Amino acid sequence: MALMDFIKKQFIDVIQWTESDEGTLAWRFPMAGMEIQYGASLTVRESQMAVFVNEGKVADVFGPGMYKLTTQTIPVLTYLKNWDKLFESPFKSDVYFFSTRQQVDQRWGTPQPITIRDKDFGAVRLRAFGNYSYRVADPKLFHSQISGTREVYTVAELDGQLRGMILQHISDAIAESGIPFLDLAANQIEFARALAAEIGPAFEAIGLKLEGMTVQNLSLPEELQKLLDQRIGMGMVGNDMGKFMQYQTAQAIPEMAKGAASGGGGVAGDAMGLGAGIAMGQVLAQNLQKGLQGSAAQEAPAAAAAVRPDDVMATLEKLGELKAKGILTQEEFDAKKAELLKKLV
């Protein structure tokens, strides 16, 4: 009687997975040399799928539901095992469960800036990060390509591979979208769509489906961000030379004050540097208000005549420096140069 009880315990009657562990993608039902009883019950819960592997080959795939394992429910195994008799006969096979629920809030990001081509700025190095979600859509393909015969395969083990795939396709996604960087940073939803479209096929190739993709931030390295801020400031003042020089003076004052302080003057040096910056700003603003505004020149010819050649040359030199730094384009420089030279006529 004890021998019969021992033999019965070697037959599995119920096959199921409660999925108690978070972050598990694939789990192999523990067989430990036991065999599945003919007519045993297979329970596949919602957000799960089960795969039967016989002699190293996937024999059948089961979606959510309860099944009685008979010759009718497993036709492939019936053929492989020659189950053409109705007597109770156990069979041996590996059973893998796969979680098909979404794996949400998976993070991605660029550890180092990546270089892309941009319509406005040429070559641009940018950083980006966000999150994404995915699920197992084809357990047979995922089993053969990724999880294999592992007893447990987790989200953490797949994380590095998926993040690498995303980073590999970022440049392609930006190029495919054709969106300039400034528009890209302002429309992160559109960029996320382009990125998802580029990455989706790579996920499908290993049995996954990309369910969602977000881009939470796009940024430039610090030195490029400063240049972009200057260009934005130029765009705000437009062709108004007075406002332009006031903007440049305001940007220069902190640096002048810092330079004076570093010369060893302490508090007095700070005050001197700041005072020199303010005085220069006042002189430039007064000169520009008197001589560089076209409308003022028409209304007051005497004021236009007061413009000195030395002031114009100094302004041209300043504009040349801005052009050399890339803040002004050649066209913008030429236009402002022509405007200044008219004042000397």
Image (spheres, grey):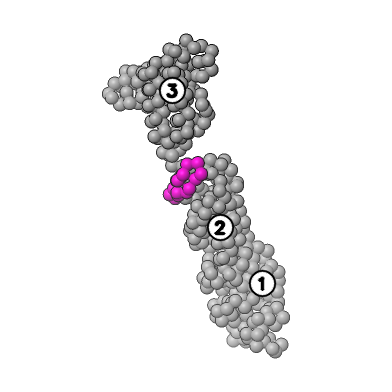
Classify residue 266 as left or right of residue 59. Answer: left
Indicate whether 345 appears above or below 15. above
Looking at the rendered structure, the kind of residue marked 1 is: Phe
**In the rendered structure, which disc, 3 or 1, sits on the residue that comes first in sequence?**
1
Instruction: Determine whether, in the image, residue 276 is placed left or right of residue 303.
Output: left
Marker disc for residue 62: 1
Taking depth in this image into account, of 298 and 208 the one nearest to the observer is 298
Q: Which mark is residue 199?
A: 2
Q: Classify mark 3: helix, strand or loop.
A: helix
From the viewer's perspective, is the residue at label 3 or at label 1 nearer? 3
Residue at the image point whose x is 64% and y is 68% from the top = 49
Residue holding disc 3: 341
Cβ–Cβ under 8 Å for marks 3 and 1 = no
Please tell me how many numbered marks the rendered image carries.
3
> Is disc 1 surrounded by few (<14), some (14 to 19) or many (20+) residues within 10 Å?
some
Q: Residue at x 60, y 68 (%)?
A: 139
Instruction: Find the magenta span and give its range.
Output: 111-123
Helix, strand or loop at mark 2: helix
Give how far across and how far down residue 222 sits, in percent.
Answer: 43, 39
Looking at the picture, how far across and down is residue 294, in whole percent?
Answer: 51, 19
Name the residue furthest front.
345
Q: Amino acid at mark 3?
A: Leu
Residue at screen point 28% across, 24% down: 263
Residue in front for this viewpoint, 36 or 284: 284
Q: Residue 330: x percent and y percent?
A: 45, 34
